[in-house]
């Protein structure tokens, strides 16, 4: 079954995504709070993520990639390298960061800006805000 492409489905899809993100965030926070007040030390999402980031630079690197993907400084962005080349470069650099982490101690804050720049250049979200008139013209 194919979902028709119109203004209603666009609004509902955006709303559904935003609601899903909000619900997931609230659930993670609630679980983190419950884990913080139990008797086991160091078992919250926050503590586990921070611990993993200290052990391997891949965790902050991936956080930076996602940050650059979502929060790049320009709209209607196109990747600097066309797919699938952008994914191959990203995967190779991620593997390089992982291997480097075995041989060099990398502070957790270092890979974040590097990943953010790469995420913005190779994996940007192309935001295209259109007016109702523009949508109707495209459908005609």
Image (tube, rainbow, N blue to C red):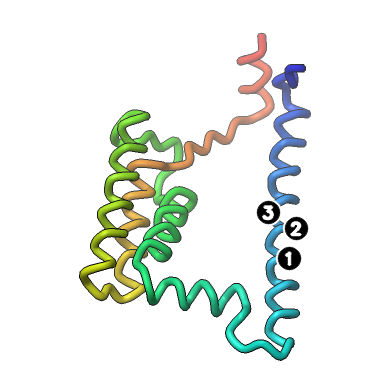
* Residue in the foreground of this view, choosing between 109 and 78: 109
* Image-based side of 112 in relation to 131, left or right: left
User: Residue 9: percent from the left, percent from the top?
Assistant: 75, 29
* Image-based side of 92 in relation to 39, left or right: left
Res. 3 mark: none
* Residue in the foreground of this view, choosing between 131 and 19: 19
**Circle 3 sits on which residue?**
21
In the image, what residue occupies the spot 54% across and 75% down? Answer: 48
In the image, what residue occupies the spot 27% across and 73% down? Answer: 106
What is the C-alpha distance between the residues marked 1 and 2?
5 Å
User: Residue 85: percent from the left, percent from the top?
Assistant: 31, 32
Tag 3 and tag 2, C-beta contact below 8 Å? yes
> Does 66 sit above or below residue 125?
below
Which element carries disc 1, helix, strand or loop?
Answer: helix
- The residue lying furthest to the left in this view is 103
Tag 1 and tag 2, C-beta contact below 8 Å? yes
User: Residue 44: percent from the left, percent from the top?
Assistant: 62, 78
Which element carries disc 2, helix, strand or loop?
Answer: helix
**Circle 2 sits on which residue?**
23
Tag 1 and tag 3, C-beta contact below 8 Å? no
Which element carries disc 3, helix, strand or loop?
Answer: helix
In the image, what residue occupies the spot 21% across and 69% down? Answer: 103
**Circle 1 sits on which residue?**
26
Neighbour class for label 3 at 10 Å: few (<14), some, many (≥20)? Answer: few
């Amino acid at each position: 079954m194919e979902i028709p492409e119109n203004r209603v489905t666009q609004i509902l899809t955006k709303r559904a995504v935003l609601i899903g993100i909000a619900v997931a965030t609230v659930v993670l926070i609630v679980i983190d709070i419950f884990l913080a007040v139990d008797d086991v030390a160091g078992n919250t999402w926050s503590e586990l993520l921070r611990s993993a980031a200290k052990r391997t630079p891949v965790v902050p690197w991936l956080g930076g990639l996602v940050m650059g993907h979502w929060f790049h400084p320009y709209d209607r962005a196109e990747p600097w390298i066309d797919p699938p080349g952008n994914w191959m470069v990203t995967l190779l650099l991620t593997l390089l960061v992982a291997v480097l982490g075995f041989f060099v101690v990398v502070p957790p804050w270092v890979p974040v800006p590097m990943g953010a720049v790469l995420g913005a250049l190779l994996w940007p979200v192309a935001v295209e805000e259109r007016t109702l008139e523009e949508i109707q013209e495209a459908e005609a």
